[in-house]
Amino acid sequence: MTKSDIVSALDELGYDPQTADEAIDDVFQVIAEALVGREKVILRGFGTFEIKTAKGWLSRDIRTGEQRKIDDYQRVTFRPGVQLKEAVKFSDPGRLLMLNRGAVK
């Protein structure tokens, strides 16, 4: 699914496509800025985005045999929430929305 697919889906729900497109951009910008600032982004029921440090390692050039140290680096991780896991498990995307509104327990 692409961003334009999401905008089209929101259009079918009655949202103005231009406003939906701008809102999606704004949401992604806020999430990206939080992650750059090393903040954890928690979207209850959906999941958590956070920055984790990946350990560096020693690498060897197979042609020359020279060893090089690869430094630690930052990576973005996503851990799905329980409700998202259940929606996927039961192959029911509507279940996530229903769980957020308290209709299904």
Image: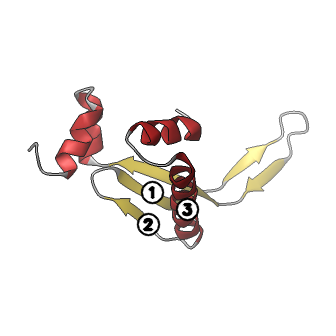
Left or right: 41 with respect to 56? left
The C terminus: image quadrant: top left
Distance from label 2 to label 1 (Cα)? 6 Å
Q: Earlier in the sequence, mark 2 or mark 3?
A: 3
| Image coords of residue 96 (percent x, y) | 25, 42
In the image, which is nearer the foreground, mark 1 or mark 3? 3
Checking the image for residue 26, the label placed there is 3
> Which residue is drawn at the image coordinates 10% and 42% (left, top)?
104
| Image coords of residue 3 (percent x, y) | 57, 41
* Helix, strand or loop under label 3: helix
> Are discs 2 and 1 less than 8 Å apart at CB?
yes
Residue denoted by label 1: 49
Q: Earlier in the sequence, mark 2 or mark 1?
A: 2
- Nearest the viewer among 75 and 5 is 5
Residue denoted by label 2: 40
| Image coords of residue 10 (percent x, y) | 44, 42
